[in-house]
């Protein structure tokens, strides 16, 4: 008597799906469009066409070079943010000096070499953000607003901030050495540093230097002609900015990590020079 059951060879074969490459036992019918590995819903990332596994997505992202500014800074949305913050700090300190702080407290914000020699090192940076006359702060902040955003866009936030602060300290250091008995204040040293860096950077980019040189010359003439202006802070900041600007502008463009190291090293070298000059000045006073 014939059986009505099909022969083993005639039975329909059970259809099984491959396991996810990361989760054995988890069947999936979707494969990575790049490498073909089976991927479950947890392990797949939607792509322009189909899905990709996480490894391929990660590999693709690392292969894409991050967009950078012309001199290696990270591209960000607001490319004048640091400039705005610096202006804000200067204005806040000016308002505090006008409305809140008493005369004794204000005396500690000036750059005064004898005070630094007595251990008041903070004067070297507080003086960079301190103004008293409204015309003084207005002129400095206008200069910062004109010079800051273009440089910040070229350098990126951190390079620009380092340039500003170290240039300001360079101005304070020369003030300490050349005129320790004279009180000084204002952001002019840091702004002269921006001018110096801009001079070097624009030369590196192949731009005409005539307008920038004219601005530097006019400001130096005013510095040495108008009584009461601290030429030491201006010249110190300018020299610091020139040195830092040279390092930032002439660092090798590739690989990016090497450029960043050279640029950071340039800033560090100038900072060390400022520190050594400060120690020499303090030793001379003592």
Image (cartoon, rainbow, N blue to C red):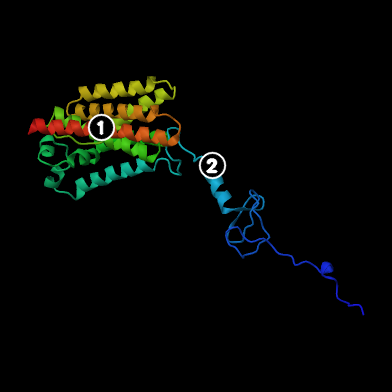
The residue sitting at 20% across, 26% down in the picture is 231
Q: Quadrant of the C terminus?
A: top left
Judging depth in this view, the residue of 230 and 166 nearest the camera is 166
Q: Is residue 242 visible?
A: yes
**Quadrant in the picture for residue 121:** top left
Q: Is residue 252 left or right of residue 93?
A: right
The residue sitting at 27% across, 26% down in the picture is 239
Q: Position of residue 230 (x, y in %)?
A: 19, 29
- Toward the right, the furthest residue is 1
Q: Is residue 188 left or right of residue 206?
A: left
**Quadrant in the picture for residue 132:** top left
Q: Quadrant of the N terminus?
A: bottom right
The residue indicated by pointer 2 is 63
User: In terms of sequence position, does the residue under pointer 2 or pointer 1 come before the other?
Assistant: 2
**Quadrant in the picture for residue 107:** top left
**Residue 277 vertical placement versus 27 (above, below):** above
- Toward the left, the furthest residue is 286
Q: CA distance from mark 2 to mark 1?
A: 42 Å
The residue indicated by pointer 1 is 189
Q: Position of residue 241 (x, y in %)?
A: 30, 29
């Amino acid at each position: 008597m014939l059986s009505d059951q099909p022969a083993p060879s005639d039975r329909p074969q059970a259809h099984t799906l491959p396991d996810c490459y990361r989760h054995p036992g988890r069947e999936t019918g979707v494969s990575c469009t790049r490498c073909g590995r089976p991927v479950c819903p947890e392990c797949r990332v939607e792509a322009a066409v189909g899905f990709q596994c996480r490894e391929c997505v990660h590999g693709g992202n690392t292969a894409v070079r991050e967009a950078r500014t012309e001199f290696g800074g990270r591209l960000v949305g607001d490319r004048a943010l640091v400039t705005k913050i610096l202006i804000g700090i200067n204005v806040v300190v000016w308002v505090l000096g006008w409305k809140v702080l008493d005369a004794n407290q204000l005396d500690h914000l000036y750059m005064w070499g004898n005070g630094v020699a007595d251990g008041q090192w903070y004067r070297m940076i507080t003086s960079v953000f301190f103004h008293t006359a409204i015309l003084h702060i207005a002129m400095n902040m206008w200069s910062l607003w004109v010079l800051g955003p273009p440089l910040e866009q070229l350098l990126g936030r951190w390079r620009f901030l380092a340039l500003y602060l170290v240039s300001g300290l360079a101005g304070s250091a020369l003030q300490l050495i050349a005129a320790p008995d004279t009180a000084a204040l204002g952001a002019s040293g840091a702004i002269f540093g921006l001018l110096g860096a801009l001079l070097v950077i624009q030369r590196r980019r192949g731009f005409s230097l005539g307008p920038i040189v004219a601005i530097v010359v006019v400001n130096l003439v005013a510095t040495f002609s108008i009584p009461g202006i601290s030429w030491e802070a201006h010249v110190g900041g300018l020299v610091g900015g020139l040195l830092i600007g040279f390092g930032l502008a002439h660092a090798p463009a590739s690989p990016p990590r090497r450029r960043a190291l050279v640029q950071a090293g340039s800033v560090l070298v100038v900072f060390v020079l400022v520190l050594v000059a400060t120690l020499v000045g303090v030793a001379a006073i003592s």
